[in-house]
Amino acid sequence: MDFIFIEELRVKAWVGIYAREKSGPQTVELNLTFGVPDSAAEHDDIADTIDYAVVTARIRHELSERHFNLIESLGEFVVNMLFEEFGAPWVKLKVAKIGVMKNVRRVGVHIQRSRPGVVVPSMG
């Protein structure tokens, strides 16, 4: 099974429940891995896969326009976008707020989802 990964994508996003978090966007870091059709490598054609440049542009745009109370909701939004707009069969996502707590580098969630009947592969 083929997959694409995007690591350490930093995006300005509106997320949080505290007043300091609602006063402006903050940096979140996303690490994504998602399935793509095996045929992409066979045909060497971008039309047979998911264009990671388009994915990152969509994530940047959407997260700059919306507010999420919870980082879990932000993550679910990104996963659903990959399913609905890009046709990914499965998604693994790690999303973290950076530097929001004293003496804590990151706070975040891991989410993994698949379409019905699709098994998310173990990456080791």
Image: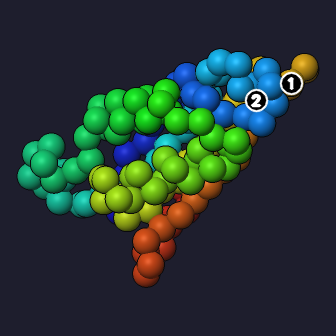
* Above/below status of 12 relative to 109: above
Q: Name the spot of residue 106 as percent of width and height, x first.
A: 76, 29
Residue 113, label in figure:
none
Tell me which amino acid carries mark 1: Met
Q: Earlier in the sequence, mark 2 or mark 1?
A: 1
- Badge 1: how crowded within 10 Å, few (<14), some, or many (20+)? few
Element under disc 1 = strand
Which numbered disc, 2 or 1, marks the residue closer to the eye? 1
Quarter occupied by the N terminus? bottom left
Can the viewer see residue 3? yes
Q: How is the image coloured?
A: rainbow
- Badge 2: how crowded within 10 Å, few (<14), some, or many (20+)? some
* Above/below status of 29 relative to 88: above
Foreground residue among 122 and 13: 13
Residue 101, label in figure:
1
Element under disc 2 = strand
Q: Residue at x 22, y 50 (%)?
A: 49
Q: Residue at x 37, y 64 (%)?
A: 89
Q: Which residue is mark 2?
A: 106
Foreground residue among 27 and 20: 20
71 displayed left or right of 100: left
Q: Residue furthest right?
A: 103
Q: Residue at x 49, y 47 (%)?
A: 78
91 displayed left or right of 109: left
Tell me which amino acid carries mark 2: Arg
Can the viewer see residue 105? no
Real-space CA distance between mark 2 and mark 1, rounded to the nearest whole angstrom:
8 Å
Question: Which image quadrant is residue 18 in?
Answer: top right
98 displayed left or right of 55: right
Q: Name the spot of residue 48 as percent of width and height, x first.
A: 16, 53
